[in-house]
Image (cartoon, grey):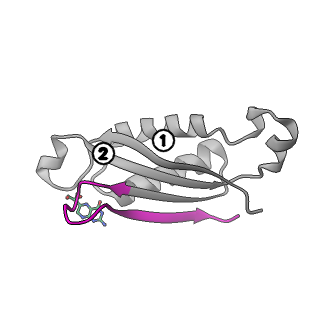
Amino acid sequence: MTDTVLIEGLAVETIIGVYDWEREVSQRLLADLEMAWDNRVPAASDDVSDALDYAQVSERVSAYLARACPQLLETAAEGIASLLQEEFGVRWLRVTLRKPGAVPAAAAVGVKIERGSR
Ligand SMILES: Nc1nc2c(c(=O)[nH]1)N=C([C@H](O)[C@@H](O)CO)CN2
């Protein structure tokens, strides 16, 4: 099953970083999420309750990032992966987190993880 639900460029302002100054200010994170889902079921029913609701996922991931305040992007990505699998029943996912302001010479830096199987 290769269907996917995606969220791109979800922007969240949060405390994240390893340095002392980073614990004092909010920084912008951008999250891209790709989540395996059998989209044939909602396509047939035309019912959002059969779909992986990207609005609900966006709200939950934003709330998680706003409250978790981890040091590392790796920790944030792993937390997002766990909540998507445990709370939304997503079997496979890819999470990309970008921290646009972290390295001035780079457009963005970040991490990408894949968890689960399709
Ligand atoms: N692989 C990572 N490297 C670094 C991270 C991170 O989260 N993962 N974080 C930092 C600092 O917080 C940086 O963003 C400050 O500019 C450094 N390296």
Q: Residues within 10 Å of mark 1 (few under 14, many from 20)?
A: many
Residue 116, x across and y down, in percent: 62, 63
Q: 51 left or right of 17?
A: right
Q: 13 left or right of 6?
A: left
Q: Residue at x 20, y 56 (%)?
A: 18
Q: How crowded is mark 2: few (under 14 residues within 10 Å), some or many (20 or more)?
A: some
Q: Which residue is drawn at 52% across and 39% down?
A: 58
* Magenta-drawn segment: 98-118
The quarter of the picture where residue 13 lies is top left
Instruction: Compare residues 54 and 72 and report the one nearer the observer.
Output: 54
- The picture quadrant for ligand 1 comes to bottom left
Q: 86 left or right of 107?
A: right
Instruction: Compare residues 97 and 17 and report the one nearer the observer.
Output: 97
Where 39 falls versus 109 (above or below)?
above
Q: Which amino acid does label 2 sit on?
A: Arg
Residue positioned most to the right: 44
Q: Is mark 2 on a helix, strand or loop?
A: strand
Q: Earlier in the sequence, mark 2 or mark 1?
A: 2
Name the residue tied to disc 1.
61
Please name which of the two marks, 2 or 1, marks the residue nearer to the observer: 2
The quadrant of the picture occupied by the C terminus is: bottom right
Residue 104, x across and y down, in percent: 19, 61
Q: What residue type is labelled 1?
A: Val
Name the residue tied to disc 2.
28
Q: Is mark 1 on a helix, strand or loop?
A: helix
Total residue callouts: 2
Q: Residue at x 39, y 64 (%)?
A: 111
Residue 104 forms part of the magenta stretch: yes
Where 77 falls versus 114 (above or below)?
above
> What is the number of the mark on residue 18?
none
